[in-house]
Amino acid sequence: MTTTTIARNTFLEIITSPLLLILALLGLVAVVLLGIIPYFTLVLEDDVKMYKDVAVAMTLFIALILAVLSASKVIDEEIDNRTMMTLLSKPVLRGEIILGKFLGVCAAVAVVIILCGLVIMIFAWFRPPWDRNVPMFSEGVEGFWAKLHDVFYPDPADHYTVRTRLSQWAHFWSVPPMIVLIFLQTAVMAAIAVAISTRLGMAINVMICALIFIAGHMISFLTLDGPWARYLGVSALLTILPQLEHFNITETLAYRTLGTASSPFSAVWAYVGLAGLCAFFYCAAALLVGLALFRTRELA
């Protein structure tokens, strides 16, 4: 039995669970509803920016719940059910079990993130021309179909057409970087939950992960100047805790116009690449700690 087999079995177990079905349905319904409702901003084109912000936040919330709840039981539950003894009786290393469980959880979470991300991209494309005609619903069926016709077949003589198309593409392609950063942040938390599951149950695991998630976003705002940083151990916290705020650039991606000289896509994807490298080291460190805890765990 290899890591790939363990990852595939874990993925199939999570993907067929009622938990994933409920959370995936909840996430899809949420991003669709958020894409339909108006946000009553002063500038109509700002509606799509606010939509991307809240929709991505909702996707992150759903993905985190799925990742932590799924990862917190992949090791502990098998130990309690004695199925881990059967698994270890085969030619498989404990490190392969840890890695396989982690990859299976990440693959299942990625399915939900991708589905929600595709819906967000669709609404990010349609909202710029959609928001130009707020009273479309009050005009009845004829007004609704007229607006759809304007979306798919814009008037070439309209001087807003070119600007609207550029805005649509900018909003459309700003979603994938945000989705990737959501996955990286979720993968880090999944690795931590898998490591904790080698020793603790689901309830305590979820509470610890919640504290780590909050601290990981707040630790970046602490300053290292003055004696308080030394007394409070800020330097140690910066070293141990994952700085999850580095994966959160939603404000830049949602509210700025990408593809311009001030915010080129190359710079955005370069940042995503560096964030991916950081996430890799965070996950590796967490899984190594989990492996050390798992090796000293008595299973009998």
Image (spheres, rainbow, N blue to C red):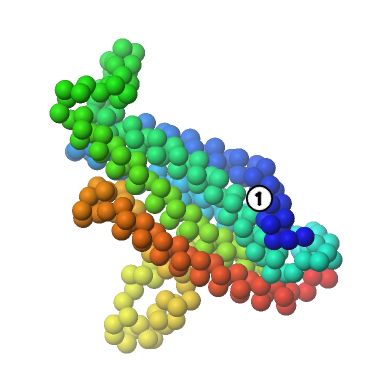
User: Where does residue 224 sit, x and y in percent of width and height?
Assistant: 32, 80
Residue shown at 32% from the left, 87% from the top: 227
User: Where does residue 231 sit, x and y in percent of width and height?
Assistant: 39, 86
Residue shown at 49% from the left, 37% from the top: 28
Could you tell me the amino acid type at mark 1? Phe
Asked which quadrant contains residue 298, the reply is bottom right
With 200 as the anchor, is 124 left or right in this view? Answer: left
Which residue extends farthest top? Answer: 142
User: Where does residue 225 sit, x and y in percent of width and height?
Assistant: 29, 82
* Figure quadrant of the C terminus: bottom right
Query: Secondary structure under badge 1?
Result: helix
Looking at the picture, tell me which residue is in the foreground, 163 or 127: 163
Looking at the picture, tell me which residue is in the foreground, 96 or 202: 96
119 relative to 111, above or below: above
* Figure quadrant of the N terminus: bottom right
120 relative to 292, above or below: above
Residue shown at 43% from the left, 56% from the top: 181
147 relative to 49, above or below: above
**Which residue in the structure is indicated by mark 1?**
11
Report if residue 289 is visible in the image.
yes
User: Where does residue 129 sit, x and y in percent of width and height?
Assistant: 27, 30
118 relative to 197, above or below: above
Report if residue 54 is visible in the image.
no
With 132 as the anchor, is 277 left or right in this view? Answer: right
Residue shown at 59% from the left, 51% from the top: 107
